[in-house]
Amino acid sequence: MDNWGGRDKTTVFLKVQNSIKSQYQSPISSPRKQSRPLKVIVASTLAAFVGIVVSITTWFALFKRRMLTGKAGDLVDLATILPGILTRFSYNDLKVITEDFSRKLGEGGFGSVYEGTLSNGTKIAVKHLDCVAQGKDSFLTEVKIVGGIHHVNLVKLIGFCFEKNHRLLIYEHMVNGSLDRFISHKNPANGLTWHTRRRIISDVAKGLAYLHDECSQKIIHLDIKPQNILLDQNFNAKISDFGLSKLIEKNKSKVVTRMRGTRGYLAPEWLSSVITEKVDVYAFGIVLLELLCGRKNLDWSQADEEDVHLVSVFRRKAEQKQLMDMVDKNNEDMQLHKEAVTEMMSIAAWCLQGDFTKRPSMTLVVKALEGLVSVESNLDYNFTNLPEVVGNQQREATISSILPSILSGPR
């Protein structure tokens, strides 16, 4: 440009803002702000994935354990009583201890019992529950009851095996076996003396009194019979086999349950399925009578058909006032104590009352055996009689239907 008026030439720079571009251009976020949401998303995804993996792993482990050891509920039931109380044996250990279960001691409704020897030389009895379905229930019941109580007249539970389908209970070994071996005998040398029988009766009564009245929960055994009364080397008696037992809260007097036990030892009220601990008292009365008479409740070897059922003979002899005829004739010592034996038969009659409300408690029986209380004198020797509240027609129907179960022997 020409120099106007002699002035120097000057260049001017103007900064012009592109308003359109600045208006529509998005602001650029900083790299730090942009990466934070991404990290949160990645962390959440990883956490969810790990949670799923842990859940699947835990579920698989529990499923595998359940398949190997049975229902998880069984383990929960046992967990409350087993720690620190009982020894857990493996099935292979028990096979060695029992010499592959070669020495059978006896057999019951839920399995067989075998003799075994621990490494320290202690003899044990191993009860192998055969039936998985019934064995599980019997196993849990017995462990719950016997594992938590201790009494000199109850067989001691030492340990258990709970492995796959194998359920076994390990008890102290009772050298002289069960009482039924000594009730019916042909050789007088094998018979028990009056003193020994009296002690056995007292032992069983004390064991039942403890179960009924001295435990935190009332325990009804429900299967009292000579086969479930075991004898040690000194012929001290202990109650065994609690697979059918029932627990009752202290504030309850009755329980509804299906009929269970052994035919020939069932009380009349079993027909109603509403029972009390008095069913054990009735069964004790049968055992007491068997021990005093030296014969089983059901004896088909009797020449007279009327004498097959021991309870029927007892009723007839009581009415004829000939109870001394019932004293064990194969044992000289029992014959020498006839009067004392017949006196104890009155305790048996007391326990066998058809109306369970008229039976004594086992605690009262113990006192009667010790001479501390008198036996009830007004006794009904028709032992199938039910309470007066039952109508006559119903009474007759009940008696006729329950008699076969009451009088028939064990299956």
Image (tube, rainbow, N blue to C red):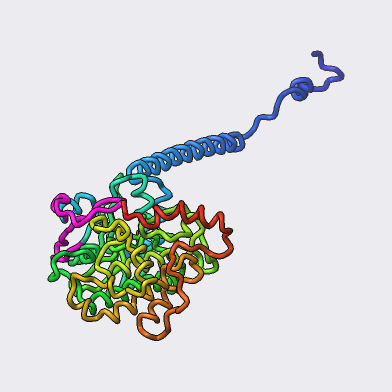
From the viewer's perspective, tell me whether residue 293 is left or right of residue 20.
Answer: left
Q: Is residue 365 visible?
A: yes
Residue in the foreground of this view, choosing between 128 and 241: 241
Residue 196 included in the magenta stretch of the image:
no
Reply above or below: 368 against 245: below
Q: Is residue 99 magenta?
A: yes
Q: Residue placed farthest to the bottom in the image?
A: 372
> Quarter of the image containing the N terminus?
top right
Quarter of the image where one finds residue 76? bottom left
Judging depth in this view, the residue of 32 and 229 nearest the camera is: 229
Q: Position of residue 81 (x, y in %)?
A: 38, 62
Image coordinates for residue 206, horizontal then vertical, percent: 35, 75
Q: Residue at x 23, y 77 (%)?
A: 194
Magenta extent: 98-124
Return the residue found at the far top. Answer: 1
Which residue occupies 48% across, 54% down? 271
- Residue 366 percent coordinates (x, y): 38, 78
Residue at 69% from the left image edge and 29% from the top image edge: 27
Height in image: 365 above or below 276?
A: below
Name, please, the residue furthest toward the right: 5
